[in-house]
Image (cartoon, helix red, strand yellow):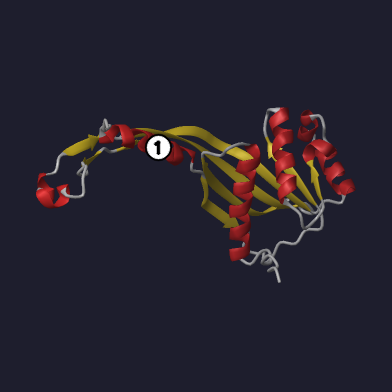
C-alpha cells in the first residue's frame, strides 16, 4: 500500500484551519460614554436611524436594527422620511418625530471599514513514525521534522458608532464604538453590535436584565 507523505495529509487540515480563522467573527466594545445625569434608559417608542449615504444600505440596516428591538414599538427613519434629503430639514424632522410619538432615537454610523492583514508565523513540527514500533526504535529527538511555512490571514474589520438620544430634548445619553471582525452580512453585523451594546447597557444598569426562562 502506497503511503502518502504527511504534508499531503496536513495540507487540507491546515488550509481548513486558515479558513476557519478567517471566517471567525467577533465584536468588541472599543469605547463608550454615558451622560452623567442618566441613571436609566426607558423608552416607549424608538426611532432607528442608519447614517448611510446609500439608500438601499440605509433601509437594510434600519430593518436589521428594528428586528433587534423587541421590547418596545420601533419605527425606521425611512418610514418617516422616505426621501433621505428630508432628514436635513431640521424643522420637518422634529415635527415628524413629535407626531410619531417617538421618545428615543438610536443611530448607527459607520466609522471605518478596512481589511487587516496578519502573518501567522510558521512552525517546525516533528514527523510521526509510520509504525507504533518506531517510537521505541529511535529516540524522539532524532525524528524527522517538516516546516509549516505559515500563512497570511486577511480580516475585514468594521467599526460602528452607536448613539442613543432622548427625543424630548435631543440630548445624547449614551454613545459607544464597536469593532466587528468578519461580519457575514448587514444583519449579522447589526445583531453582533446590538448584543455587545445591550450587554454594556445592562452592565451599567441602564436597562434591566433580560427575564430568565423558567
- The residue that mark 1 highlights is 18
> For residue 148, what is the image quadrant?
top left
Residue that appears at 66% across and 64% down: 206
Residue that appears at 82% across and 32% down: 82
> For residue 186, what is the image quadrant?
top right
Q: Residue furthest bottom?
A: 214
Residue that appears at 82% across and 39% down: 93
Q: Residue furthest front?
A: 1
The percent position of residue 191, horizontal first and vertical second, equals 64, 47
Q: Nearer the viewer, residue 15 or 194?
A: 15
Q: Nearer the viewer, residue 190 or 132?
A: 132
Residue that appears at 58% across and 42% down: 160
Mark 1, other Cα within 10 Å: few <14 / some 14–19 / many ≥20: some
For residue 157, above or below residue 199: above
Residue 170 in the figure: left or right of residue 128: right
Numbered disc 1: secondary structure: helix
The percent position of residue 209, horizontal first and vertical second, equals 66, 67
Quadrant location of the C terminus in the rendered image: bottom right
The percent position of residue 143, horizontal first and vertical second, equals 14, 43
Residue 139, visible in the rendered structure: no
Quadrant location of the N terminus in the rendered image: top left
Q: Residue furthest right?
A: 99
Residue 182, visible in the rendered structure: yes
Count of numbered badges drawn on the protein: 1
Amino acid at each position: 500500500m502506497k503511503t502518502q507523505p504527511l504534508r499531503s495529509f496536513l495540507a487540507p487540515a491546515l488550509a481548513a484551519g486558515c479558513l476557519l480563522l478567517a471566517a471567525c467573527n467577533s465584536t468588541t466594545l472599543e469605547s463608550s460614554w454615558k451622560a452623567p445625569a442618566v441613571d436609566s434608559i426607558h423608552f416607549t417608542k424608538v426611532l432607528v436611524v442608519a447614517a448611510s449615504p446609500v439608500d438601499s444600505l440605509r433601509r437594510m440596516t434600519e430593518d436589521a436594527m428594528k428586528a433587534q428591538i423587541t421590547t418596545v414599538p420601533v419605527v425606521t427613519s425611512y418610514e418617516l422620511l422616505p426621501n433621505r434629503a428630508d432628514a436635513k430639514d431640521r424643522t420637518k424632522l422634529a415635527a415628524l418625530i413629535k407626531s410619531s410619538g417617538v421618545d428615543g432615537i438610536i443611530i448607527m454610523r459607520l466609522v471605518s471599514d478596512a481589511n487587516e492583514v496578519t502573518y501567522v508565523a510558521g512552525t517546525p513540527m516533528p514527523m510521526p513514525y509510520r509504525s507504533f514500533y518506531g517510537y521505541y526504535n529511535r529516540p524522539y529527538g532524532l525524528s524527522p521534522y517538516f516546516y509549516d511555512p505559515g500563512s497570511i490571514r486577511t480580516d475585514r474589520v468594521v467599526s460602528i458608532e452607536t448613539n442613543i438620544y432622548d427625543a424630548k430634548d435631543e440630548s445624547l445619553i449614551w454613545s459607544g464604538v464597536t469593532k466587528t471582525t468578519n461580519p457575514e452580512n448587514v444583519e449579522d453585523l447589526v445583531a453582533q453590535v446590538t448584543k455587545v451594546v445591550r450587554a454594556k447597557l445592562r452592565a451599567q444598569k441602564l436597562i434591566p436584565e433580560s427575564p430568565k426562562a423558567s
